[in-house]
Image: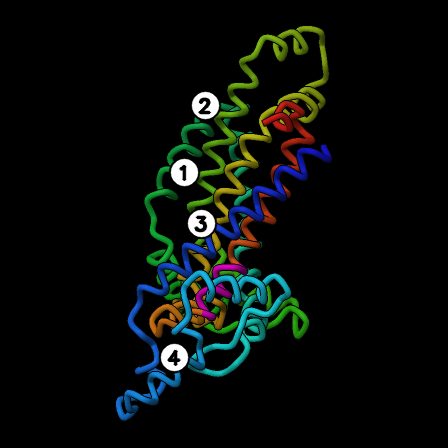
């Protein structure tokens, strides 16, 4: 398990370097931001001085190396437009995006795995119903669903707030109420994906010879399902959950705009629009680290459930 962990961590570091390097290169292709920073009245000398101040006159590899050496020590730079530290700006907004993505992932995992297992075990009308609902969940866009939820449950029924976010430390109940609609709007499709994968994995395990042998020996049903069926079908389901987290993180950034949540979505959008490289790189680093941490945890759990996965 130690070697398995070392391999995963090394792979995560390489991915972080590659992704941030590509992002930095792509941002260098954007229009020169110095004109937008200084305004239309800036002279050529002003623009040259600003480029020198921002380090844009240096070679790309030199610029990236300087940024990366600071980033590994926790310094993500200063926004070229606002003048605020990128780390502070992200820290203020991250709890909102992280709350959305983590809650949606938990909902997707719990409901998806539960529905998938029920469909594979019960079969019949329940299996058909889960597959039908799953197909519908894939087809419904999260943005459209979010708007319907706001109209129905916020504006008409007044059950939940239409916009805004309440920090957990301020009021846990209001924090949960403020996230119900956005989490629901982005979790529906993921629940369908996890349910479909879990249903297929459980059905495959149930059809294996050793399951029939254990059943024929009179092993209690609950023990058969929990100890053998669930454990052997979980690696496939958890792999889908980790992949869904990436999609849910991106969906959270979009849904923030609908529900007026001041997460990192709007921050990243404004940074990309203004060619604010430190902001974009900071958001990318945080997003990649979150994805890598979740994938690492899932890999460790899968490796514990299935020792064969450790050798991959």
Residue at the spot 42% in from the left edge and 56% down from the top edge: 251
Residue at 34% across, 83% down = 48
Say the numbered circle drawn on residue 134: 1
Q: Which residue is mark 2?
A: 124
Residue 162 seen in this snapshot: no
> Which residue range is magenta in the image?
278-286
Q: Of marks 4 and 3, which one's residue comes earlier in the chain?
A: 4
- In this rendering, the answer to whether 284 lies above or below 270 is above
Secondary structure of the residue carrying tag 2 is helix
Question: Residue 129, image x and y in percent?
Answer: 42, 33
Q: Report which residue position mark 4 lands on.
A: 51
Q: Which of disc 4 and disc 2 is earlier in sequence?
A: 4
Q: At which x and y percent is residue 8?
A: 61, 40
Query: Cα distance, mark 3 to mark 1?
Result: 17 Å
What's the residue at 51%, 62% (across, down)? 65
Q: Nearer the viewer, mark 3 or mark 1?
A: 3
Q: Mark 4 or mark 3, which is nearer to you?
A: 4
Question: Which of 106/265 is in front?
Answer: 265
- Residue bearing mark 3: 247
Q: Residues within 10 Å of mark 4 (few under 14, many from 20)?
A: some
Quadrant for the N terminus, please: top right
């Amino acid at each position: 398990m130690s070697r398995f962990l070392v391999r995963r961590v090394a792979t995560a570091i390489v991915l972080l370097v590659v992704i941030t390097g590509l992002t930095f290169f792509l941002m260098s292709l954007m229009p020169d931001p110095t004109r937008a920073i200084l305004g239309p009245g800036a002279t050529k000398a002003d623009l040259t001085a600003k480029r020198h101040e921002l380090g844009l006159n240096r070679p790309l590899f030199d610029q990236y190396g300087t940024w990366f050496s600071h980033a590994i020590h926790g310094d993500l730079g200063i926004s070229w437009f606002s003048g605020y530290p990128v780390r502070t700006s992200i820290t203020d907004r991250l709890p909102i995006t992280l709350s959305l993505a983590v809650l949606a992932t938990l909902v997707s995992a719990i409901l998806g795995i539960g529905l998938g297992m029920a469909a594979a075990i019960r079969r019949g009308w329940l299996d058909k119903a889960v597959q039908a609902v799953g197909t519908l969940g894939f087809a419904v866009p999260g943005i459209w669903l979010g708007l319907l939820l706001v109209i129905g449950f916020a504006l008409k029924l007044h059950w939940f707030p239409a916009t805004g976010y309440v920090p957990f430390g301020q009021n846990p109940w209001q924090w949960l109420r403020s996230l119900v609609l956005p989490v629901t709007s982005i979790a529906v499709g993921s629940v369908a994906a996890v349910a479909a994968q879990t249903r297929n994995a459980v059905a495959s395990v149930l059809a294996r010879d050793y399951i029939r042998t254990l059943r024929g020996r009179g092993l209690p049903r609950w023990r058969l399902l929990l100890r053998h069926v669930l454990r052997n079908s979980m690696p496939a389901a958890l792999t889908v959950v980790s992949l869904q987290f990436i999609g849910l993180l991106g969906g959270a950034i979009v849904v923030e705009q609908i529900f007026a949540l001041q997460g990192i979505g709007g921050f990243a959008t404004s940074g990309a629009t203004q060619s604010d490289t430190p902001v974009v790189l900071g958001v990318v680093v945080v997003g990649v680290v979150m994805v890598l941490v979740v994938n690492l945890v899932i890999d460790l759990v899968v490796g514990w459930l299935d020792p064969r996965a450790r050798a991959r």
